[in-house]
Image (spheres, grey):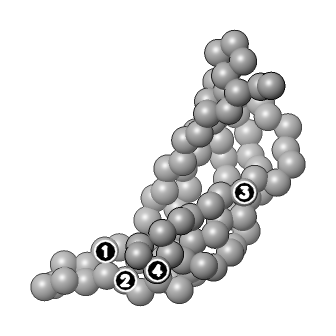
Amino acid sequence: VGKYPEATLTLREFDLKEEGEAMGVLKLHNVEKSIPISYTSERDGDVLKVKTDFKLVLSDFAIDIPSFQGITVAKDIQLQVEFTARTK
């Protein structure tokens, strides 16, 4: 985390509906990878809330599997992303 403190998910152009699919680029651990995502969205006036979750394999992003005294993190993890946008 100290060396790569940020992760970004960039969504390519897509038609925003209540739910759908889009292609995104996830940059994690200084590695970029295209990923398909499914999302849901909810509009409240000029505020849009979007949620997605997807699996990723840590080794795809050059991340070693952490282990400490026999306790190991799974090689694939479920990632949840939520963001809020407001129209101008």
Q: Nearer the viewer, mark 2 or mark 4?
A: 4
Label 4 sits on a secondary structure element that is loop
Earlier sequence position, callout 4 versus callout 3: 4
- Can you give x and y, in whole percent of width and height, for residue 13 in the image? 86, 48
Q: Nearer the viewer, mark 1 or mark 3?
A: 3
Kindly identify the amino acid type of the residue bearing the numbered disc 4.
Lys
Res. 66 image quadrant? bottom left
Q: Nearer the viewer, mark 4 or mark 3?
A: 4
Residue at screen point 77% across, 30% down: 17
Earlier sequence position, callout 1 versus callout 4: 4
Local crowd size for mark 2, using a 10 Å CA cut-off: few (<14), some (14–19), many (≥20): few
Disc number placed over residue 65 in the picture, else none: 2
Kindly identify the amino acid type of the residue bearing the numbered disc 3.
Thr
Kindly identify the amino acid type of the residue bearing the numbered disc 1.
Val
Query: Going by the image, does 11 lie left or right of 83?
Result: right
Disc number placed over residue 73 in the picture, else none: 1
Quarter occupied by the C terminus: top right
Residues at discs 2 and 1 in contact (Cβ within 8 Å): yes
Res. 24 image quadrant? bottom right
- Can you give x and y, in whole percent of width and height, for residue 2 in the image? 41, 76
Earlier sequence position, callout 1 versus callout 3: 3
